[in-house]
Image (cartoon, rainbow, N blue to C red):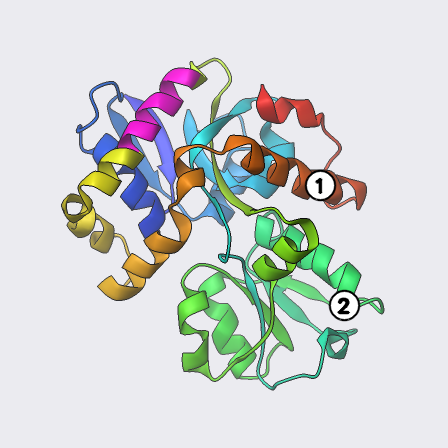
Amino acid sequence: MTKIAFSPCPNDTFVFHAAVHGLIEDAPKLEVTYADIDKTNYWAAKEEGPEIMKISFAALPWVLSNYQLIPCGGALGRGCGPLVLTKNKIKDATALTGKKVAVPSDRSTAYLLFRLWAQQKIPGGLGEIVVMPFEEIMPAVQKGEIAAGLVIHEARFTYEQYQLHLVSDLGSWWEEDTGLPIPLGVIIAKRELDGDKIAKWIQDSVHFAWKHPELSKSYIMEHAQELSEEVAASHIDLYVNQYTADLGNDGFEAIESLLGRAMKEGLVPDFDLKLLRK
């Protein structure tokens, strides 16, 4: 039995449905722990973490000595970045100078993108940055408890229900700034395991999901945290793409650019970028 941890989000359950349910010939039997990425980011940094995990690309610098990057099964793409939201419409980002902002994690790609964006767009600097469960951020912004919130996941599709205003789509900013896709979530595996074999059955599970999308629907909705089928389908369409099947050169360049810039700004520990491809 191989222990694996990934989130209950529709993109992850879509990707791993076939492997979890014994529909992929070469996949091992999987013991699944469903955990949001903010939890797996820290769990992976501990020695007792499971053999295979889904974490944020931003957490890689803390874990690459023990885990290898698997070049498929993750979330990386265009038009799928986190959003910065406020209660009232503001003229530009400098209005957030010295203000309190909530983020869903301080070890996530969303957080790195936010900090890199803020350094460029808010030269006077932010005020307090607080970590808050992502489902609490939009209500807190709506109530005026915080000046702005960084949101991820399905909040892209629901923030207008809270009468909130978009300050910046950090995915669009990143793509304009670099020309590269956005690295969000990545699959990692213990270094003593055969990474090529793991990549093969994960790729097979991805392709099976695309070929037979109807088979995974009940599994996806069982774990979809009260999302509607329409929102779950939009989530999958946005986060499961060509990079999920294979990171490719663009994918690796995006990861190296994000983590290289973050390392230069002191947002992540120093590490050898070559470990990303080993």
User: In the shown orientation, is residue 91 left or right of residue 27?
Assistant: right
User: In the shown orientation, is residue 207 left or right of residue 69?
Assistant: left
Query: Residue 248: x and y, percent?
Result: 51, 31
The magenta segment is: 196-205
* Majority secondary structure of magenta residues: helix
- Please give the residue where the numbered disc 2 appears in the rendered image: 126
Q: Is residue 253 above or below residue 105?
A: above
Dot 2 falls on a residue whose secondary structure is: loop
* Amino acid type, label 1: Val
Query: Residue 100: x and y, percent?
Result: 69, 72
Q: Is residue 209 magenta?
A: no
Q: Are marks 2 and 1 in contact (CB under 8 Å)?
A: no
Distance CA(mark 2)–CA(mark 1) = 19 Å
Q: What residue is at 39 percent from the left and 34 percent from the top?
A: 245
Q: What residue is at 30 percent from the left and 36 percent from the top?
A: 206
Nearer the observer, 48 or 92: 92
As drawn, the label of residue 268 is 1
Question: Reading the chain from its start, which is encountered first: label 2 or label 1?
Answer: 2
User: In the shown orientation, is residue 247 left or right of residue 128?
Assistant: left
